[in-house]
Image (spheres, rainbow, N blue to C red):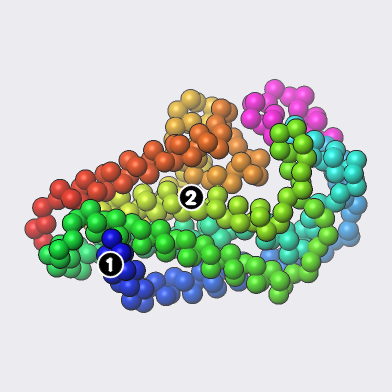
Amino acid sequence: MLNPIQNEWMKLWAKKGTWVMTILLIISVIGLMGLTKWINNQDRTEATDWKSNAQEQINYTKEALELDLPEVERKQNEETVKVLEYRLANNIPPLAVDGRESLIINPVGVGSFVVLLTVIAAAGIVASEFSQGTIKMLLTRPVSRWKIMTSKYITVLFFGILLMCIGFAVTVISAYILFPSGAGQELKLVGNAIVPVSVWGHGLYMLILSFANVLITATFAFMIGSVFRSNGMAIGLSLFIFFTGNTIALLLSQYEVAKYLVFTHMNLTMYETNSVFVDGITMPFSLVVLAVYIVIFLVISYTVFTKRDITA
């Protein structure tokens, strides 16, 4: 399997578009960090006491808890109150908004950029063989079709992982150049205990969670490109899911079917940001649902590609 993967990897990086996408990612991340710096500079209001802000948020959240809230929202609000009360009791300020730690600990913006670029690669890695007329030459090699598909899919995954690493590295470098070190400590509720959160550990963890979105969207694009041999259709449908999936899941959140929609589980960072909007789902459940969808997408891709009669 090593040689087919090497061949696909070299073919991918032989394309000018791959280098352009990588450079575009770097420029986009730097631009986002620069825009954040500019907004912070423009929004320099008089500093307020974090304790007053925390107390106001506690009061507001407790008022919300008196309403008839969905169970998942009630749980999130209760956790918020516990963390804020712990901060006040132990005099632990939150991370400074304009500090580099706040940007490193939550680099989810990187995942959004990487999704867009990885989808382009996944959509075209099979479809382009048909559109460029190289599919017959590819299939005449002494390599089985399933190995060809596996090498292409693994290449897409490696490309996505590489872009995530590059994006995170650029984020960290930009944060150190553009933003000062800030005070404060991130806290979270684990079981019944409030524990401090490592900036670097949490940042890498959020990056891994963000990759779930990249993985499922790229696998879907890979399937559409393989089945319909259309680069444009694969990119269009994949980006449609990426941009509208969360809205669709939110609209259907009151129905049981929402638990089993892929849209509901694509953003795993919701479990760390207390933004879960569907009752009865957990991280393990989301991982199982995503795994099932990935298997379905790959089975369809492999079945169509291995059974197809190449006539063009």
- Residue at figure coordinates x 15%, y 65% from the top left: 141
Of mark 1 and mark 2, the one earlier in the sequence is: 1
> Which amino acid type is shown beneath numbered disc 1?
Asn
Residue 56 appears in view: no
Residue at 73 percent of width and 50 percent of height: 197
Quick one: 59 or 13, which is closer to the camera? 13
Q: Which residues are magenta?
A: 59-76
Toward the viewer: 34 or 303? Answer: 303
Residue 265 location in percent, x, y? 50, 40
User: What residue does disc 2 label?
Assistant: 213
Residue 112, image x, y percentages: 52, 57
Mark count: 2
Circle 2 SS class: helix
Judge left or right: residue 136 versus residue 287: left
Q: Main secondary structure of the magenta part?
A: helix
Foreground mark, 1 or 2? Answer: 1
Q: Amino acid at mark 2?
A: Asn
- Residue 125 placement: quadrant: bottom left
Q: Residue 239, image x and y in percent?
A: 42, 53
Judging depth in this view, the residue of 242 and 188 nearest the camera is 188
Residue in the picture at 44% in, 32% down: 260
Residue 176 is drawn in which quadrant? bottom right
Q: CA distance from mark 1 to mark 2?
A: 29 Å
Task: Determine which residue is flagged by label 1.
Answer: 3
**In the rendered image of this protein, does residue 76 appear above or below residue 126?**
above
Which residue sits furthest left?
A: 311
User: Is 172 above or below relative to 230?
Assistant: below
226 versus 162 height, above or below: above
How far across and how far down the image is residue 81, in percent? 79, 35
Magenta-drawn stretch contains 46: no
Q: Tell me if residue 300 can be seen.
A: yes
